[in-house]
Every structure is written in structure tokens, then in C-alpha cells.
Image (tube, rainbow, N blue to C red):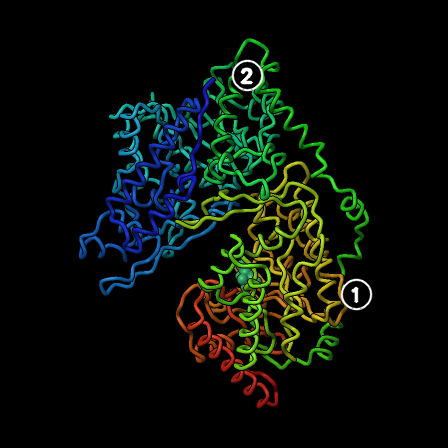
Amino acid sequence: MQTHNLGYPRIGSKRELKKACENYWSGKISLAELKLKGREICLQNWKLQQDAGIDLIPVNDFSYYDQVLDMSLMVGAIPQRYHQILENHGKEELDLYFAMARGYQKEGLDITAMEMTKWFDTNYHYIVPEFNKNQSFKLFSTKIIDEFADAKQQGIKAKPVILGPVSYLLLGKEKEEGFDKLDLIKNLLPVYIDILDKLSKYGVEWIQFDEPFLAMDLGEKAQQAFKAAYYEIKKKFPSLKTIITTYFESLRDNLQLATSLPVCALHIDLVRCPEQLEETLSALPENMTLSLGVVDGRNIWKNDFQKSLQFINKATEKLGEASVMVAPSCSLLHSPCDLDLETNEKNLSKEIKNWLAFAKQKLDEVVILKKLATENVSGKLSTQYLENKGAIENRKKSLLIHNDKVIKRMNAITDSMAKRENTFPVRKIKQQNSLQLPIFPTTTIGSFPQTPEVRSWRAKFKKGELTATEYEAKLKKETEESIRWQEEIGIDVLVHGEFERNDMVEYFGEQLKGFAFTKNGWVQSYGSRCVKPPIIYGDIERLSPMTVEWSSFAQSLTQQYVKGMLTGPVTILQWSFVRNDQPRSQTCNQIALAIRDEVSDLEQAGIQIIQIDEPAIREGLPLRKADRENYLKWAINAFRLASSGVKDATQIHTHMCYSEFNDIINHIAAMDADVITIECSRSQMELLDAFAEFNYPNEIGPGVYDIHSPRVPSKKEMVELLKKAAKVIPAENLWVNPDCGLKTRHWEETKKALEEMVAASAEMKAAFLAKDDQTVV
Ligand code: GLN
Ligand code: ZN
């Protein structure tokens, strides 16, 4: 039995790589210094895994930005627009690489970055490969070979990790019409062969091909591509030990395909999909090793040794010890680095800490599991086993987790709680009568710029350098200024600005019972950006109102409406580490009840418009089509549970910022928010087509400007977009707003852009009122 790891976090336990990259980008350190840091992290990670006792240690899992971009550079899939950087400016490979990731605005060049998108259903984002019809590939970057050689020289038993050719192609995007990216496999394979050839010369024994698509819905062509690729590799390298890894889903209908590929080992995710063990065992050919992903690479809970040992024993009984490998379920890239760094008991009590394992601890778990499964002496008497059992039992019974009050409320949920009093047409009239908003009303999505100053107050407050009263006074002043300014430029529905919030999930988590926090639990989101998800460990209860004070304060300053601003239950769930001892749907409903109470309290306090943000609803969509309806059913219901406890005249908004609503538009409509604001400007309103085709009944605010860039859009552009929108959506259903919150922008551009936006709305208002037939097109 061997242990192995699929990948280790590369950002560094203190985010060293993040800092080094950012310092390099801003010119504070040299390329040589950056590379030194990168290598230091590699060495540390290898050593750490070696010391932990992992048998096969991944290399090439390190990346300066993203492992998919690494692949594009490796196989020379470098879009034409970047060629001039190398040709004319004599840049290093890594500069080209960062240009592809981040764009390049220097030396008179202005080259856009490559697109970025989510890595399956994680919060990690990869750089999307770009393919052309006659795409050719050639070995360009030798990073994998260099890293392998380096590791080998350090005495590391290294297993290079490479994104498999089929998954690499499937992750990419065709940049022109008239071809299928899978057709490129024949051009791509020779580069893989070239790489394997070079690795073989360095004496590679094992190699890991990540093929997550093998666990997704696959077409015929993709299945053929899998066969073609791995037969070719086997033919060229008959004695190479190849392992194909799948994760985040189960093999299901691809089981026959997966077990028929000529590879030495197959890795399956038994944390997400424990049910696939049985059938995989029966389908596995005699000469194939099964790698059991038993330690959760996506969540922070301690492994349940008893459960994992059952899996391992079942596999060894069937296959024999030599044909079983033990591993985390997926790359540990998605786990925070090291639980030992969490020493602040106020954030994370000793009891809760004892239930957790981060990447470093997960390595130990993998090694202990092998030991327990293979040692003759009864493992069940070892201290490690008993300690683990104690922790698992303590968690099951802990008073911290179970809250009878919450359970009672959960049991009392009725269908009618997820329904507004009346349907939208009735509500619309009541809302119109009570709110008296103009046509093409203007609003923003919630947050205003979080200046370094605002952030410094929060830091000082946390360190105790500002008292609560001082901190609050500063925030109040900032809020008041923003209200005054919104009044001045003539925005119709105001927001308080969210200056008091660090993060839209953390802010609520900190006020809810059942949440814990880490100090260093960072996980890479994209490039140098990391997130620190809160941990939902127990039943969720709202102890007191969370936003009412700020909203009421803001509302007290003005005669105009100020929107209440909440984060929705699905988004809070999605952006946290979630408990694994009950279904996600149940946890989501607990959050929904807490938000529902907050909505009621806001209404009681006189807030007549309340926004519940759900930017994460779509990313929670299961990877397999067959599972989607079920998810959407409970997710949409949780939103409705949170939002339906108000009077008809209270206007509920929701906000989402992603594209592609086409396939879920009926569910978006089923959320039954009175108003939905969405990101739209980057697609030039194309997104609205889904709403138009569906005849979306409620009101919509299609974002009229992209907030991701400091560029100030002109009134003219926004009028154009609004006209486009008014062609497909009735004018009386349209709102005017930016794509998303303005937290990351500066005030200077924000002010200019919103003034232009208000002017654009005014032009639309005037045009609308001037026309007898009331069409603006
Ligand atoms: N209300 C939030 C904000 O304005 C919404 C953020 C989001 O959609 N991600 O920042
Ligand atoms: Zn948004």
C-alpha cells in the first residue's frame, strides 16, 4: 500500500507567494528574488510531505498563478496577442506568463488578460486556454521537467502532476468557429509524449494525470479522446506508472471507460461520492491499482478513521494491499495550510479546533490511515486511532453544535413561509403606490469604495487602537457623506455603503451562532488572491439584529429610500466551510431562518426596500446535470424562506453577478424577488436575452457598467445599453445600476461613473415620458 498526495497548497502558510508575486508586480523585488521565493516554497512543501511520510510526493503542483495557465505555457498555447511581448521586449518566460494572466499595459502595449473562470464547483479560478482552428502545440515551458529534476536531486520521491490532455482541452475555449477543441488532441498529444520522454530521461517512475472530466457528463467524442490519448501514451511508454485522478464527482456512466483505460492506477473521490467504491471495485481490472481519496481535500473536518478504514479494508480485501493507494480526495490546494497556526482561542475554541484538519494535518491523516490499515497489531488500540475516535465522538455530541431552539424552528417550517402574500402583479401595484419610484429608477448594488482609510480604522479597532465608539463615529461620518453625495447626484434608491463590513459573508458569520473563524485559514481563489472562508460548525442562530442599526441610521439621514442590504443563505453557505454532519440543504435553511428574521426586523424598522444578495447561487450548481434540479429546488426555496416574511408593499431585491442564466432562468424567476440586479455590461446586455425569451415577469436592473475596471463609462454608452435593454424588457420593469458593488473601486472614478449613470437614466426617463406610445426604442 502506498500513500500519495495529489497537490499541496502553494500560496504558503503565511501567504508568502502572494506577497512575493505582488511585490514583483509592483516592482519591489526582482524576478530572481521571486523565483527564489517560489523555489523555497517548493522545497518546503516537498520536505514537509516527505517528513510526514507520504510515499509519492507531487511536483509541478506548484504554480506562480494557476496550474492550467502553466499547462498552456508548457504546450505553447500562447495566444497571438502576447507574442509581441517576447519578440519586441525580450521578456522572460515568467513575464509573458503574468501578462497572459493579468494583461499587459506597458511600453505602449495594451494587451488584455486571458479569461478566468471557476475550477469546477470550487472557489478556485483558472485561466481559460484559448484555442484556434489550426492550433498547434509545442513544448514551450519546461517547468515540469525542471521541478522534477530539482526534487529528485533533493532526494524527494517525486511524482510529477500534469493536467491530462482531455481535461486540458475541455477546460479551454474555441476562439473561432468551425472546429471542435477535442479535435486538437492529435496536435496536443505529441507535446505530452515529448514531456514524458524528457521526464523518462530523468528517471520518472510515477506520473499523475489529472482528468477531472472523467467524472463529469461526457459526450461520445470526449470518451474517444480519452481512449486515444491513453492508448498512445501506453504504447510509447509501456513501463511508465500512470495514475489518472478524478475528483469532485463520481465516475457513474464513465466507469467502464475509466476502468478500460490502459493506466496503472485510478484515483476516485470517496469523500464526495463514497457510493462509487463498490461498483468501481467490481469493474476494476486485475492489473489496475485503486487510489482511494478518503481524506477530504475540500473541507476542514478531521477524517473519521473508522469510516475511512472501512473503505480501505474493503478495497484491500478485493484487490490486495499492493493494489491500493491512500490519498486525499483531491488536491489540497482547496484546503487552508496549517491548523497549528490557529492559536487564537477567541476565534476558534480548543474544542472546535480538535475537530479540524488543514492541509498539513491531512497529510498526517493519510499516513496514519495507511499505518492503521497495514500494521498487524490491531490498529484500533493505537493512541492515534483512539484520539481520532474521541474527537469524532466529541463533535457528534458537543453542546456547541446542537441547538434545540433551532431544531424546533426547522421542524416548524411550512410551505407557506416560502411564499409572499400575493403574486408579483399584485405586489407591484402596492409597491408602486407606496414607493412612488420614477421610471428607470437608479440604484447601486450596495458597497461603496473601501478606502485604505476605512480599512485602517477596522484594523485599528480590531487591535484595540480605536474604541468601539470612535470606530463607529468614523463609519457614521463616512456613511453620512455617502448618503449626502447620493442625494446630491440624484440617485433614486440609496444604499448605506457597507463601510462597516469586511466581507459580505464574514460580516454575517461573525454575528451568527454556529460560525467559527480562522486567522490564517487562507485558500487560493485566483492568482495572488486568497479567501478565508468562515467555518459553519453548528446549528445557526441569529442572536440579535445584525444590520438594523446601520440601515436605520442611514435611513434616518434622508427622505429617500435606503435599501437594506443582506447576504442570502445560499451565498453564505457556498462561501463557507460547511459542516458535513447534515445535508447542505438543512444548513442552508437554518441560515435562511436567520436572514428571514433580519428581513422582518428591517421591515419593522421602516426599511421598505431590502436587497438579499445571492451571487453564489449558480456556482453551487452540481457538476452532473442529473443532480441540478434537486439542488435548485432547495436553494431557491431557502432564498424564498429568507425573503417571503414581508408585506407585499415591501420590495425585495436580489443581486447576482455572473453570466449565463439561460439554463436556470426558470429557477431565477422562481426566486420571485421583486427586483433582480445582474451583471450585464460585459456581455453588452446579451445576457438579458434569456430574461426576454423567458418573459421574465418581475423587475430587472441589468448592470450598465463594468465595475471591474477603473474606466469611467460615458452617459452615451449607458444610454445605448439601456436602449438595448428596453428593446427586450418592458421599460416599466427596468432599473438602472452598475454591474456589482463598488467596494474595490476608488471614489474618484466611482463618483464620475455614477453621475454619468444618473444622467443616462434621466435621458431615458425624458425619452420615455415624451413618447405617447411609451416605447423608448
Ligand atoms: N452588496 C454587495 C456589494 O455591493 C454585493 C457583492 C457581490 O455581489 N459580490 O458589495
Ligand atoms: Zn455582484
- The mark found on residue 421 in the picture is 1
Residue 538, above or below 659: above
The mark found on residue 373 in the picture is: 2
Residue depicted at x 24% and y 54%: 83
Q: Secondary structure at mark 1?
A: loop
Q: Nearer the viewer, mark 1 or mark 2?
A: 2
Picture layout, residue 717 above or below residue 248: below
Q: How many marks?
A: 2
Instruction: Return the residue nearer the eye: 550 or 694.
Output: 550
Residue 126 placement (x, y as % from top left): 42, 48
How dense is the environment of label 1, judged by Cα within 10 Å: few (below 14), some, or many (20 and up)?
some
Residue in the foreground of this view, choosing between 455 and 676: 455
Residue 695, above or below 588: below
Q: Earlier in the sequence, mark 1 or mark 2?
A: 2
Query: At 58% from the left edge and 83% from the top edge, which residue is drawn?
Result: 775
Residue 5 in percent (x, y) is at 44, 29
Please, what is the three-letter code of the amino acid marked with disc 1? Glu
At x 47%, y 32%, the residue is: 360
Quarter of image, res 313:
top right
Label 2: few (<14), some (14–19) or many (≥20) C-alpha neighbours in 10 Å:
many
Q: Between residues 728 and 598, which one lies in front from this camera angle?
A: 598
Q: Is residue 172 left or right of residue 359?
A: left
* Percent coordinates x, y for residue 481 in the rendering: 53, 74
Q: Amino acid at mark 2?
A: Ala
Between 89 and 535, which is closer to the camera in this rendering?
535
